[in-house]
Amino acid sequence: ISPVRSILSRFTPMGIYNGHQLYLGPVPTVEFLNQFKVTFIFNCCQRQNAKDLTIKTSAKERLFNVSSWKWTKSYTYKPLEYQNKNKNDEEGKDKENDDESKDNDEDGIKMNQMQYLDAMIDELHFHLEKGNIIIHCLAGAHR
């Protein structure tokens, strides 16, 4: 089996949008991200992926912990570029980088659960217009 087909046996091409490919699959590898020129990782798991995925590639990552999404919860949305800037500022602190609402969170846009879900979908569309993306989901529920 060719190396490309071997990689694609784990990652499913879901379609093309504005000339860019959407993939779905497990934890991506640096090799996959670089070979398929993936610029955005939409991570639907409970934790960020290993840092080397974004350090050794040009990909940015959004964590959207699907398991903690609740109908009654309110959220604070921060654009990914803002989060990455703050993550660099907070390096060395033992703080989970979760984009969901915190009581002391004054930055970002406050929104209800459906607005937050819409913001996640809009962010997917935004990044898919600029390059290839992968949705990393633990259970494959998006398929």
Image (cartoon, helix red, strand yellow):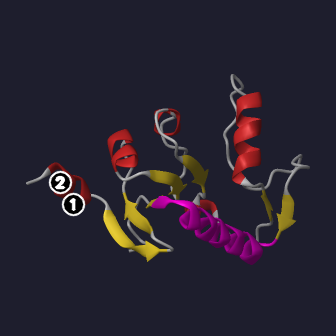
Question: Is 41 situated above or below 54?
Answer: below
Secondary structure mainly formed by the magenta segment:
helix
Which residue is tagged 2? 6
Is the Cβ of the residue at disc 1 closer than 8 Å to that at disc 2? Answer: yes
- Say what amino acid the circle numbered 2 marks: Ser
Q: Is residue 137 magenta?
A: no
For the point 59% across and 57% down, the residue is: 65
Residue type pointed to by label 1: Ser
The residue under the point 60% across, 58% down is: 64
Rendering quarter of residue 121: bottom right
Secondary structure at numbered mark 2: helix
Seen from the viewer's position, the closer of residues 118 and 13 is 13
State the residue at coordinates (86%, 63%): 110
Number of residues whose C-alpha sits closer than 10 Å to that of mark 1, classed few (under 14), some (14–19) or many (20 or more): few
Could you classify mark 2 by the number of other residues whose Cα lies within 10 Å: few (under 14), some (14-19), or many (20 or more)? few
Indicate whether residue 131 is drawn in magenta: yes
Q: Is residue 125 above or below residue 3?
A: below
**39 left or right of 64?**
left
Please tell me which residue lies in front, 119 or 69: 119
Task: Quickly name the residue at label 1.
Answer: 9
Q: Secondary structure at mark 1?
A: loop
The alpha-carbon separation of the residues under discs 1 and 2 comes to 5 Å
Image: magenta residue range? 112-134
Residue furthest out toward the left: 1
Image position, residue 86 (x, y; %): 77, 37
Residue 116: give x, y in percent of width and height.
73, 69
Q: Residue at x 91, y 49 (%)?
A: 106
Task: Evaluate whether residue 71 shows in this view.
Answer: no
